[in-house]
Image (tube, grey):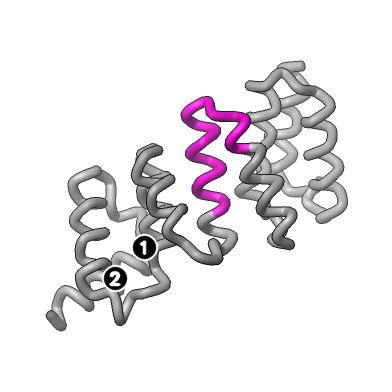
Amino acid sequence: MESSENLIRTILRNPNTITSTYLAKQFHAQILKIKGTFHSDNSIVLSIYSNLNHLHDSVRVFDSLQSPPALAWKSIIRCYTFHGLSVQSIASFNEMRALGINPDKHVFPSALKACVLLKDLRLGESVHGCIIRLGLDFDLYTGNALMNMYSKF
């Protein structure tokens, strides 16, 4: 039990070490098995599933969170966008904002890509306005996503 808890702690510090569905499912099972100690780490499990582009598992874990933190919102928005579910991506982006959670430079590229997939320039401009209001318009990652969006329109 002690060694599995140490392994979980190690993976939580670097979740990118999980690179397969099998390992993700095993890790998730261990988190559930030792629920008391690691009760707040479902957002990291969600991040792992999202990085592996597992929509069903990502949505299931996201829906289990009572108050999703920013990491969870970033993960679900990215996963929706990756799967071409732009309406769900933008709806999640809007819900995140309505709850007072500010998106960061890792959320905006997915939101902007969703605007492109929807072919909605006005929505993209609205997201751009949000980027400016949050002071992220000089972030390189976000700037590249903006240039990509405007070049597609």
Position of the C terminus by quadrant: top right
- The magenta region covers 73-89
Where residue 9 sits in the image (x, y, percent)? 30, 74
Position of the N terminus by quadrant: bottom left
Q: Amino acid at mark 1?
A: Asn
Q: Please name whichever residue, 57 or 63, is drawn nearer the observer in this view of the structure.
A: 63
Q: Is residue 114 magenta?
A: no
Report whether 55 appears left or right of 32. right
The image shows residue 142, relative to residue 24, as above or below, that is above
Where residue 43 sits in the image (x, y, percent)? 44, 61
Q: Say few, some or many: other residues with alpha carbon within 10 Å of mark 1 (under 14 / 14 to 19 / 20 or more).
A: few
User: Decide: marks 1, 2 in contact (CB < 8 A)?
Assistant: yes
Residue located beneath label 2 in the image: 10
The image shows residue 116, relative to residue 28, as above or below, that is above
Report whether 21 appears left or right of 13. left
Q: Which mark is residue 121?
A: none
Where residue 14 sits in the image (x, y, percent)? 36, 63
Q: Is residue 75 magenta?
A: yes
Residue located beneath label 1 in the image: 14
Residue for point 74% across, 48% down: 139
Q: Please name whichever residue, 90 or 71, is drawn nearer the observer in this view of the structure.
A: 90
Report whether 126 appears left or right of 97. right
Where residue 141 sits in the image (x, y, percent)? 66, 43
Element class at badge 2: helix
Element class at badge 1: loop
